[in-house]
Amino acid sequence: MGKGGEQPVRDQVAGKKGLKPFKLNHMPTEELRKWAKAYGVDSEKNREELLFLMNGFADGIMDKNRPSNPPIAPPPFTLKDLKDAIPKHCFERHLSTSLGYLAVDLLKAFLLGYAATYISQASAYGLPQWARFVLWPMYWWAQGCTLMGVWVLSHECGHQSFSESEFANNLVGTIFHSALFVPYHPWRITHAKHHNNTGSCDNDEVFSPFTRSDWGQEMLRETPLANFWGIFVMFTVGWIPGYLVMNITGPRKYRGKNANHFSPTAVFFTKEEYWLVVQSVSMVYVALACLGYAIFVFGFSTVFAFYLVPYLIVNMFLVLLTFLQHTDVYMPHFRGAEWNWFRGAICTIDRSYGFFWDRATHHITDTHVCHHLFSKMPFYHAIEATAHIKRVMGPYYKHDPTPIPQAVYRAYHCCQFIEDTGDIEFYKNVK
């Protein structure tokens, strides 16, 4: 619950006792006290009070695949300790190396697209008629992964980790983010704010936690069907228009204000950034014009099959990886004096999505802790650097081996809100 967050709940205990069995009622008291400590709840309370206070965490606690909570106490190491543990060459950025990775991704995208031209003619090559119903989804998934790799390299440009040249970084980032209909500079600006405020209850830019008062009495969310529907909506429209246009998962301070990444007068842009936004949005319009021309020449169904479906898969991946990098039952958020940049940066989760996906997306998911600590470090050194920082961070480093589908459901189902008060907060659900 964290400092300052217990009193509102404590006042409710007397009225709530005995209404229904608590989910952790089967748990021995000593084990219950250990979990209470892990969540910042006063472990000296009596058993009935603990059962009530811990009930919102119960579904996450009972998940056998979850890792342990990171320690609540501030870390005993510093950013300098972590940087000193990493070989100096890991911080070197090389334009030629980054361009090489980009060229490989573009070659893969071309070859996949060329191979896909034969799918509709599968029967002419001795394959059964139904083969195309298998081959098209295989192409969409592979091309989506490949284009996600291109998106990640553009993301590197936004962090200036693609090369030492700001001009080269912004040029490459603008071209390839625009090709995926992302306004480069607006995204770069707000993404930097996310990195500057990670783990803050009030100021994080993306998947900012709802509070109990925000949540109200949304009991419909309790049903599995509602959970699956919510996940589907999040993955299909969560990136655009959900985030880029409507900023649905942004912080409370933007509510009721213009928070559209395509608007140069949006609340998160300064007057000095106005023309950068205009420039980026103009490039997206150029990309949309190219898309329209392709549809005119090749037809909508062709463009849809070859480009738009993989594009939608990229959007799904963006929401998936961002959601799971910062959201789970064991990951705290901070307010007030408990939050600082370093503490927020280490409250990030590494996950592996498998050999192919990790490499196709340039290890954006299994080295994300390192990325938040050293965002100018090029991705091709992050695996090596992660091995070194893990030794220094100890239990503060979090790698979650939970299978991805299960992790998505757990995070969506269990991470519904945090309390309105309290300086160290963990997600709860309504149950």
Image (cartoon, helix red, strand yellow):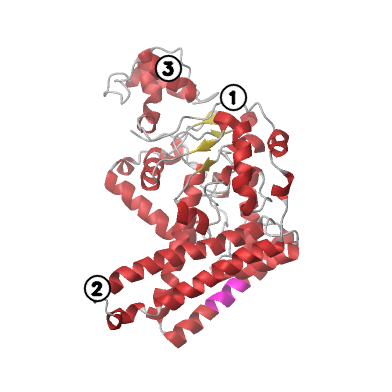
| Nearer to us: label 3 or label 2 | 2
Eyeballing the image, is 98 above or below 39?
A: below
Residue 173 in view here: no
Residue located at (35% from left, 71% from top): 136
Upstream in the sequence, badge 1 or badge 2? 1
Name the disc covering residue 430, or none: none
Q: Secondary structure at mark 1?
A: loop
Magenta region: 283-289
Eyeballing the image, is 79 above or below 207?
A: above
Of 158 and 79, which appears nearest the observer? 79
Where residue 278 sits in the image (x, y, percent)? 66, 69
Name the disc covering residue 33, or none: 3
Where residue 344 sits in the image (x, y, percent)? 60, 37
The residue furthest front is 126
The amino acid on which the numbered mark 3 sits, given as a three-letter code, is: Arg
Residue 60 in view here: yes
Where residue 169 sits in the image (x, y, percent)? 69, 63
Q: Secondary structure at mark 2?
A: loop
Determine whether label 1 and label 2 are within 8 Å by CB: no
Name the disc covering residue 130, or none: 2
- Tell me the distance, in whole angstroms, between the alpha carbons under discs 1 and 3: 17 Å
Q: Answer with the quarter of the image where residue 163 lies.
A: bottom right
Residue located at (73% from left, 37% from top): 84
The amino acid on which the numbered mark 2 sits, given as a three-letter code, is: Trp
Where residue 159 sits in the image (x, y, percent)? 67, 55
Check disc 1 and report the residue beneath it: 73
Residue located at (37% from left, 22% from top): 52
